[in-house]
Image (cartoon, grey):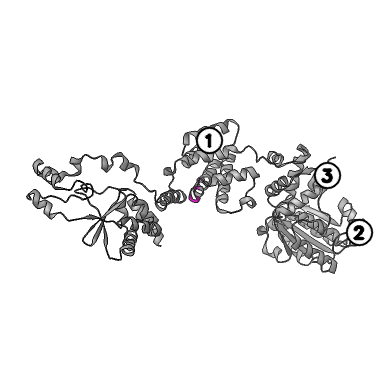
Amino acid sequence: MYQALYRKWRPRAFTDVSGQPHVTQTLMHEVSTGKISHAYLFTGSRGTGKTTCAKILSKAVNCLSPENGNPCNKCEICRGIDSGSILDVTEIDAASNNGVDNIRDLRDEAVFTPVKAKYRVYIIDEVHMLSTGAFNALLKILEEPPSYVIFILATTEVHKLPPTILSRCQRFDFKHIPPEDISDRLRYVASKENITVDDEALSLIARISDGALRDALSLFDRCSALDKNITADTVSACAGTASREYLFDMAVHVKNKDAASALGLLNELNKNSCGMEQLCVELIDHFRNLMISKIVKNPENLIICSTNELKLLKEQSSLFTLEQLLSYISILETASLNLKKGLDKRIEAETAVIKLCTPSLNTDIASVLARISEVEKKILSGSFSAPETEKVKPVSNIPKETEKPAAEKISEEKRETIEETAPADTSAEIPETKAKPDKTGSDAEAEKPKRELFKLWPEILMDIKSTCKPVYGFLINSTAYLEDNKIYIKAENPVFRNIFDIPNYSAAIEKSIRGITGKDYKPALYEEENKSRPNDPLFDLVKQIDSLKNK
């Protein structure tokens, strides 16, 4: 009968164990010096070698001719323990033998001396599954066992063991096996089994196994059954990591806020028998991979995928901000909980997809931070523009009669006189002052303040660009006029009128003016006659962002 590779190539000596030198070297030293404890506790995740080391230790303490702490695997005792013919070494599965009666039987049996071996060894696997009564029954003999009895407890959930048990054992923590150690072991097995495998395939298997050598050997076994020449594509096909393009497509629909296309893709996946809960888990994992690709310089150590998929992840991660990815993961985690208790799983999944594509529907903290991040990014890049509500009725499209209602009080003859007296080349630059109805045209002209174009303004703009880029973004294509001790700023972007009220931004402008001119000119807004200030709904948000920066 064919024997699985993880059973066939189970280490038979401490020197064959991969990735646990802190455990194997200590146990070898204890065996070689004879300082053997009466109780051991091996803890760690699955597939890291706990049961393997327990079996090796049971042979090493009973071996007739040990070799530097390792069992010889040739003597009668070693071969008998491997074949199971020596009953002095007993392996118990605590998951199926977890009652108090089972432990009482063990305790009654332990008082008898070994038949063939030197020590009677009890290996209790998954010891955390024992009941409270079973732990109490084990406690006394574990504290004061006969000199010829050794207990080896193995568990993946050490936190479930009572402190009274933990304090009576010599504890060894098994770590995740490094990918390079897994690759080396697989390469050795491949050479013995006459299997050809490339380095990329070995690396992918090592990452998929997530530090568990048994899982790596099981996957390697499946790949060898499919093809004796194992490549990365073979591993992807056997591990089920291939054909996941729909995750990238869904992420693109989310980025484009295209809910219709996202729902269409969800419908196709549902037709192909893709479970909604599984899809939600895969999307969480995908956005997590995008987050890792965006933050970590070398994400290949944290992401389980092929080289081509890793390249796609790095490219797609640049499309999203970190706040967006965190928001997507939060939405999907909530959806995953709702899918388990919802009446219709498809409706829950469709609702989650719509929320992903429509950020305005989400009011959780992660989603709000993502939306604020987009606004802040536009402000810092200098490309922030007025909201769409202002584009519906822009100020520049209002007829001149409505822009200057005070002009209706002036007669047509007086208005013509004022327009004729103004210079033709500077009429667009010199603002009109508010004319009083009881003044004549010449008196109104005489009372106008004399403002001249400020020629140093371009140099000041360059200084603002280097010191306060957000303000520079609002001042692109702006002009300035000098009158007395003030510089009147005329900006093309109407939002600047609100930005100017923020103390930090107005102070930055004043600092640049002082640095270029050497004088204490005060910046002010260029006000046209009766021109109303635009009602900007984002003004409060901008002020909040600025206050957060100061904190």
**N-terminal label among 3 and 1:** 3
* Disc 3 + disc 1, Cβ < 8 Å: no
SS at mark 1? helix
Quadrant in the rendering for residue 60: bottom right
Whether residue 412 can be seen here: yes
Q: Amino acid at mark 3?
A: Glu
Q: Which residue is mark 3?
A: 193
Q: Residues within 10 Å of mark 3 (few under 14, many from 20)?
A: few
Tell me: residue 41, above or below residue 229. below
Q: CA distance from mark 3 to mark 2?
A: 36 Å
Q: Residues within 10 Å of mark 2 (few under 14, many from 20)?
A: some
**N-terminal label among 2 and 1:** 2
Q: Which residue is mark 1?
A: 346
Q: Residue sitting at 12 percent across and 44 percent down?
A: 415
Pinpoint residue 498: horizontal percent, then vertical percent: 30, 53
Q: Amino acid at mark 1?
A: Arg
Q: Residue sitting at 58 percent across and 54 percent down?
A: 296
Comparing labels 2 and 1, the label whose residue is closer to the camera: 1
Is 78 placed left or right of 7 in the picture?
right
Tell me: residue 180, above or below residue 395. below
Pinpoint residue 312: horizontal percent, then vertical percent: 59, 43
Q: Residue sitting at 73 percent across and 66 percent down?
A: 168
Is 258 placed left or right of 72 in the picture?
left
Q: Amino acid at mark 2?
A: Lys
